[in-house]
Image: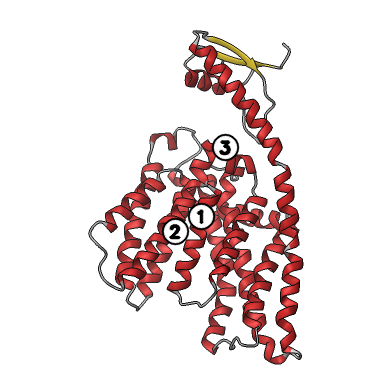
Amino acid sequence: MILLLLIGLIWIFHEVKKMINIQLPTVVDFFMAVSLVFFSVLQAPNLFQIYFWRSSSLTHVAPVILFLLLTAFILFYIRSVKGNTPAFWVSPTVFFASLVIGGAGETPTVFMVVVYSLLIYYFWRHRGLDRRPGLILISSAFAGTFLALCGLFFAPANFLHGKTSLLLLPVAILKSLKFTFEFIWDTFLILPIPTVVSVMLPGLLFFGLYVKPDQPPLLVVQKKRVGIMLILLPLLSYLLIAVSFSPSAYAQAYPIERARFIGRFLMTAALMFEGALLGVWFAQLKTHLSYQHLLFPIAGIFLLIVGLYPLRSGLWLWNNVESYRAWASAWDERDATIQSRAESGEQDLVVAWFPNRFGIKDIDGSTKHWVNRCIADYYGVNTIRSVPTGE
């Protein structure tokens, strides 16, 4: 999934670059994509729940990956048709794909609806050849995602837990904004070093790219766009993070760790692109600085120094792999034992107790616990309970 996330980001960066006509080396796409994936993993609220627990990753991470791949395909197709009407099969395919992706869970679906709404607005204001195919395909994606959201919202289970009501929607909006502020504030307090590094790395890279002696300065209109984006990017990011938190706020709760994946991903992306924009903006001051020919090598040296932090953090992540591997081996061994005993005809199982890790509830000591009842149904036995090893 992490590799697919990386591929989706590289592809969509490439397509956005083509769409807005930015001339940057392809290696920049790889750099930004790898950095974004790395910092999203490093700062994940709960690494196990988000990336390793399949029940969670299928409803929180996989839809985001598929959304990136689908959107990259849409942008690629818009660019390839050169203003013509898309082929008859493309719009239904996009509609059906977005419907399936949107059905995975409320959090990514609400996020997708808002992103596709913003893209519809962009293509509506666009005056180029891409306007017609863009509106057709993005509207198809929006329609499929919105239908999926309606299905999720009006599903009977949405009203069974007693905390949701249409009357609470205004309260949910306010809580989403509040939760987003708390999330951002906590990030700066709890993760200051990776937060600063995620701004500095792309900042130094783009400063080096635009401060090179052979790089002409930006035009006045381009400088104005950079300034506008520096202001709009934090506001847009705040809005999208709040949107991703809205399903949890609607249920009257702060987003649990796995539901904060999109928020973490968006904030990391916002910090990185804000750093990139700052790098471009500062590079325009080179005409007012002495020894201009030294600015590029100095930026490269500082980029290498700051790049040591991801290497150090990567080693820390790698050192945790063995503990995950040991846990997975023990879990698989117990799973094989349970399956073997169930196939041999045992109906009331007593198995080894594992301590709860990563915020995941394990088999309980009571056969009446809802988790135990679900597990017993999964394995096809009457009851199942756990006891500490040695009892």
Which is nearer the N-term, disc 2 or disc 1?
A: 2
* Amino acid under disc 2: Val
Q: Are marks 3 and 2 in contact (CB under 8 Å)?
A: no
In the rendered image, the vertical position of residue 308 relative to residue 221, given as above or below: above
| Residue at the image position 49 percent from the left and 34 percent from the top | 162
> What is the quadrant of residue 352 in the picture?
top right
The residue wearing badge 3 is 53
In the rendered image, the vertical position of residue 274 relative to residue 96, given as above or below: below
Q: CA distance from mark 2 to mark 1?
A: 8 Å
Indicate left or right for 174 with 143 as reference: right
Residue 25 in the image: state x and y as whole percent.
Answer: 55, 73
Residue 84 in the image: state x and y as whole percent.
Answer: 26, 71
* Amino acid under disc 1: Val
Q: Foreground mark, 3 or 2?
A: 3
Assess disc 3: are there few (<14), some (14-19) or many (≥20) residues with their C-alpha within 10 Å of its C-alpha.
some
| Residue at the image position 61 percent from the left and 87 percent from the top | 214
Which is nearer the N-term, disc 3 or disc 1?
A: 3
The residue wearing badge 1 is 243
| Residue at the image position 63 percent from the left and 55 percent from the top | 38
* Amino acid under disc 3: Trp
The residue wearing badge 2 is 114
Residue 117 in the image: state x and y as whole percent.
Answer: 40, 62
Which is nearer the N-term, disc 3 or disc 2?
A: 3
Secondary structure at numbered mark 1? helix
Q: Point out the image quarter for the C terminus.
A: top right
> What is the quadrant of residue 355 in the picture?
top right
Secondary structure at numbered mark 2? helix
Q: Are marks 2 and 1 in contact (CB under 8 Å)?
A: yes
Assess disc 2: are there few (<14), some (14-19) or many (≥20) residues with their C-alpha within 10 Å of its C-alpha.
some
Residue 166 in the image: state x and y as whole percent.
Answer: 43, 45
Between residues 339 and 48, which one lies in front from this camera angle? 339
In the rendered image, the vertical position of residue 316 relative to residue 126, given as above or below: above
